[in-house]
Every structure is written in C-alpha cells, then in structure tokens.
Image: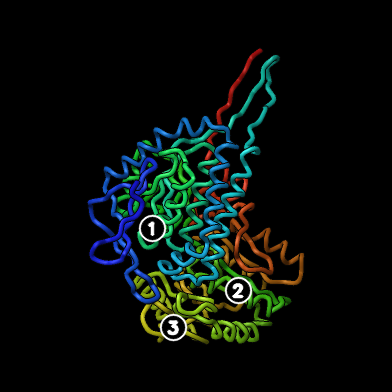
Amino acid sequence: MIKLRESRMSEIPVYQNYINGEFQPHSASYIEVTNPANGELLSRVPNADTSEVEAAITAAKKAQKAWAAKPAIERAQYLHKIADKLRQNAEHLAAVITKEQGKVLSLATVEVNFTADYLDYMAGWARRIEGEIITSDRPGENIFMFRKPLGVVAGILPWNFPFFLIARKMAPALITGNTIVIKPSEETPNNCFEFTRLLDEVDLPAGVFNVVCGTGYGVGQALTSNSQIDMISFTGSVATGSAIMAAAAPNVTKLNLELGGKAPAIVLEDADLDLAVNAIKASRVINTGQVCNCAERIYVHTAVADKFIEKLSSAMAATRYGDPMKQSDLEMGPLINQASLDKVISMVSKAKSEGAQVITGGKVADIGPGFHYEPTVLAGCHSDMEIMQKEIFGPVLPVQVVASLEEAVELANASEYGLTSSVYTRDLRQAMRAIDLLDYGETYINRENFEAMQGFHAGTRKSGIGGADGKHGLYEYTRTHVAYVQN
C-alpha cells in the first residue's frame, strides 16, 4: 500500500488522497504547502479532480450500511485505537501542525491531546445513544422513536484548528453509524494526512473514512453538490458557508455550519481587572487571534476604562511572538498567509482613519520573514467602525467605552454574528442578567473563551446552523425514525 512517497527532485514529501482504505497514486496537479512563519516549502498535496471525489463518495456509500450494522460499541473501539495512536505520536503531530499553520508548539500539543480526548469522549457515547417511547392516543399502540445514521457525511475543515476539526466531524459521524469524506484545507492539509497515516494502522474498514484534498472551488464544490452526500459539516467563513448552502440546496442536503464570530467582551465597573485583562488577552492572542470564538471587541465601563486600557495595553505589548519552531516560550505565531495579514493591515488603517487611537502595536512586526503582526490595542472605537462590526481574525483588540451593562449588551447584540460572548463582573446578579440579555450561543463569565467538549458549541445569526460537541452535537449526525406499533 502506498502511504507517502518522496519526490526524486527533493526531500519535500508528496502526500496522497486516502480512498477506500488506501492511499491513492495521484497524477493530476499538486498544491504546495508552505510555512507561514518563514515561507519554507513543506509539502506537495493533491489537487483532486472530480473523479477522485466521486470515488471517495462511492467508497463511503458502499461501506456505510455494513458500518452502521456494527454495534456502536464496536465502532467505538476504532476511535479508542486512533486516540491511542495520536497520543503515541503527539510530539511529531504537534510539530507538523505548527510548521504548516503557525500556532505555537504548546498550543499544537494541546490540540493533539485534546483531539485524542475528544475521540475517546465521543466513543463513550456508544452505549448512550437513545431513542424515545412516546405515549399514544390509541389503545394498544406503542410509538417508538429511533435514532439512525444519516449516511455519508462530507466534512470540510478550516485551517485554524485543522487537526481537532478532523475529530470534531469524524468522531460523532462514525460513532452514530455514518461514513465520512474529509476535505482538509489546502492551507493546512499535512496534519490530516499524518492523522490518516495513523488511522490506516488500526484497520478501520475500507471506505469508512476517506480524505480528498484540493480547493474549495474544486473538491469543495464537488462534495457539496453531490446527491449522494447526506450531510455537510463545514467550519469556515460566512461567504463559503453561503456558497455551500447554495450548492446543497438542489439536493436539500442537511447542513451543519460553524461560521464567523465577533465575540464581545464586556468589562463592568466591579470587574477584577487583572483577571479580565489576562482572560481577554488569552482569548485574543491564542492562535494569533485566528479563532472564531475568541474575543474580537471590548466594551468597558467608563468608571474603569482608563485603568483597564492601560493594563490591557501593557499585557498585549508584552506578548512573546515569532517563529514557533525556533522559540519554545512564545504566546503567538504568524498569521496564516499574506491575504490574512493584508486584511488586518487594512482594518487597522481604516479604524485609525475613523478616529481610533493605537495604544500599542498597530503595524507589521519587524522580525524577519513570515506573516507577523504586532499585538494591538485600539482605543476610542465606536460601534459604527468596521473594526467593531467585521471579523478581524488577527491579534487586534478594539475597545469602546460604555456607561452601563444595558448599553454594552445592546451594542454587543447589534451584530450579524452570534457565536460567543464574555462578561467580567463580581456581581452574580449582573452576570445572570447579562446571560439573559445576550443573544449568543455561548457566554463565558470571568474566564477565557474556550468551549468544553461536553458542551454544545453553536451560534445564532450568521455564525452558523446547528452545532458541535456533547450530546446535542452527537445527535446532529442522526435522523429520527418513528414507528407506530399497534398490538
């Protein structure tokens, strides 16, 4: 079986698609993957054509019924075996993630271990998937509701947490009896192929898990418009999510979409400012601000605004950043590519032209090659500014001063996004009132923005459709079948 071949021209690895339990020889075009910290060429990956996508879907379709017929506890054993493989190879996998995505090595290591834990967690649902018995209006009748798999799932991955999102899509899909075709981001596909190399060693039945790599316009379009796909699970931008909805519409394919975020952080007058600063900074510099649920804008009460901004600016200015493969104690690496860097530059420039003041940062970092931007705090912001409305996806924190919780909540809710939010206060009544008023899928009180695998990660408005994690995320991958049994 071909797993990975080396180019005769160099030592750059050339990866291959994984279809029907085998790594497939590939003769079409390739995509080059580079390190965003220094521009180094890391690999060449397939730019799959339609025939390869069709082959993966066909393999998944063929394998699905036999896979669903296995007891869930047997399906769970495969997830446990994969989790063990990930832990045994955590150091190597973390390095692969850091090189191609740019996150610091400590965070990449957390991502690998969290992914293994997530596989074990979802495997633990094998004996907990439940239907219902519903009371009938008719004598002698029983009504049963069963949960059944959907069929073939298309899992389309983002580049910001590319390794974890493999498990977030495949684990609930497989434990509930579905099969899956994964499309990794062309920006960060290497970790997915390394994941697949390990998965191949546990003898998962052929066709249950497939990987086809390529562009959104190519592989993505072929997957989302295919009538044999029963569910599309996508994490990424609103624009791409809208395009997926359009492609899926003719087939009325079920969608699970986690899209953008513009998370507000509300700092009230009684907040522990040191706690708030540390948590908000942690929620912003994580993965260089390239996280859909991290703090994107701050509303701080006027009574503590000056002190808070001073403390926040000092904390952001002290952020250690650079090439994460050269320094082990960093908090932040580069942005993913030139387009992302250009977007941050443009948004900060526009905010400055609209009256925002740069307290710290505000420019490209002068540290050599790569897509590095200084950790930035902008004061004097107001709700009409683009930077308070549109997703930045970079290490920039715009701050607006408010007079009350009510004003902060009103501004926070006036957004096209509705994924996460956070509030900092010592007053439990204020915290509960904020939870009641905030129109968001998640709210964090006095802590950083980071969800739990047993929760339910979901948003409102343009932040997506459906959700992930926990019991409710698991059931996203099932359909109901109600049977009326008359005795």
Find residue 69 and report its horizontal and vertical position in percent. 52, 30
Tell me the amino acid under the disc marked 2. Ile
Tell me the CA gap for discs 1 and 2: 28 Å
Find residue 110 and report its horizontal and vertical position in percent. 56, 64
Counting residues from the start of the chain, the first of labels 1 and 3 encountered is 1
Left or right position of 239 against 92: left
Tag of residue 352: 3
Q: Residue beneath label 2, please?
A: 280
In this rendering, which labeled residue sits more in front, label 1 or label 3? 1
Find residue 204 and report its horizontal and vertical position in percent. 47, 41
- Nearer to the camera, 87 or 281: 87
Tell me the amino acid under the disc marked 1. Ser
Tag of residue 185: 1
- Counting other residues with Cα less than 10 Å from the Cα at mark 3, is it few (<14), some (14-19), or many (20 or more)? some
Left or right position of 195 against 227: right
Tell me the CA gap for discs 3 and 2: 22 Å
In this rendering, which labeled residue sits more in front, label 3 or label 2? 2
